[in-house]
Image: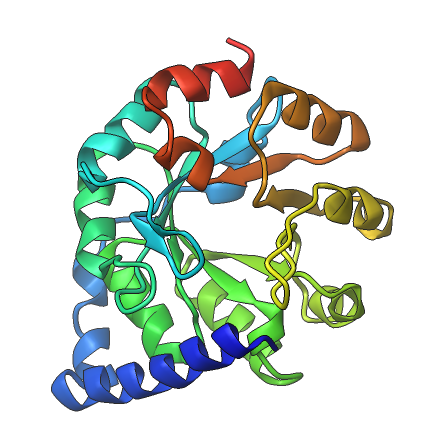
Amino acid sequence: MSDILQRIVASKRQEIERCRAEVTERQLESRLAQAPPTRNFRAALERGPGLGIIAEVKKASPSAGVLRADFDPVAIARIYEANGAGAISVLTDEPFFQGHLSYLTAIRQAVALPVLRKDFILDRYQVVEARVAGADAVLLIAEILGAQELPTLLKQVGDLGMEALVELYDRANLPRVLDAGATLIGVNNRNLRTFVTSLDHTLDLVRDIPPGCCLVSESGIRTRADIERLEAAGVQAVLIGETFMRADDIGQKLRELRGA
């Protein structure tokens, strides 16, 4: 685990305990009945034609700083929906990415697309939190979850009617991701230690993903040629954030990547 990832995880554990002290898990669970019905995240990605695009609402990152000064999460989500995104990912981590869980709730109310909570999920508390906020899916990162934590959280996500996009970088984590029962699998193209990004990382792993799984390539996707290269290799979907956040015209960039 990289130094930055260790710092984020340590911060997140403290955040979970602060939140639990303010609102208990039982109190959170009492709000589940008011959560909107889940939308099918994987089906939205596989609807086609072409690769499904998970378009990300992301204000900042630890490595790049603020990505978009005129950041309006709901307006961005509506642009994504109007221009053919399959689903929306919302960064909800506040200290490192300047996100917030309230962004997800507001976006879920404003668009008809399925919405993913992208955060550093370590505990069932966050899974319940995500469903109460309106999430249809959550991100689970293999690199920060132990041998028992990953299958346990994956089951807890499913028990609440959501789907989990299970992300990995290190090839060594793929067997335990599959053993945990993940079928929606993300490959992060960004090296978590050096922050160097290469699409070859997905291309090197694609042959090891079993039939029946939906493979999502994440990070470093910037051009239509990148999309075509991944699609030709058998990738089913992509997750794109920074490319859209840096675009002068987000809708035009999304149409360009879709080949529309």
Question: Residue at point 35% right, 19% down?
Answer: 251
- Residue closer to the observer: 242 or 227: 242
* Relative image position of residue 60 (x, y in whole percent): 33, 52
* Image-based side of 175 in relation to 108, left or right: right
Q: How many marks?
A: 0
Question: Within the image, what quadrant is residue 47 found in?
Answer: top right
| Residue 213, placed above or below residue 248 | below
Residue reaching furthest to the right: 207
* Relative image position of residue 176 (x, y in whole percent): 74, 72
- Residue closer to the observer: 150 or 230: 230
Question: Residue at point 33% right, 44% down?
Answer: 67
| Residue 141, placed above or below residue 234 | below
* Image-based side of 50 in relation to 249, left or right: right
* Image-based side of 27 in relation to 211, left or right: left
Question: Residue at point 48% right, 59% down?
Answer: 139
Q: Give the quadrant of the N terminus.
A: bottom right
* Relative image position of residue 79 (x, y in whole percent): 28, 24
* Image-based side of 156 in relation to 126, left or right: right
Residue 212 in sight here: no
* Relative image position of residue 83 (x, y in whole percent): 37, 18
Question: Residue at point 21% right, 87% down?
Answer: 18
The color scheme shown is: rainbow
Residue reaching furthest to the top: 260
Residue 119 in sight here: yes
| Residue 87, placed above or below residue 48 | below
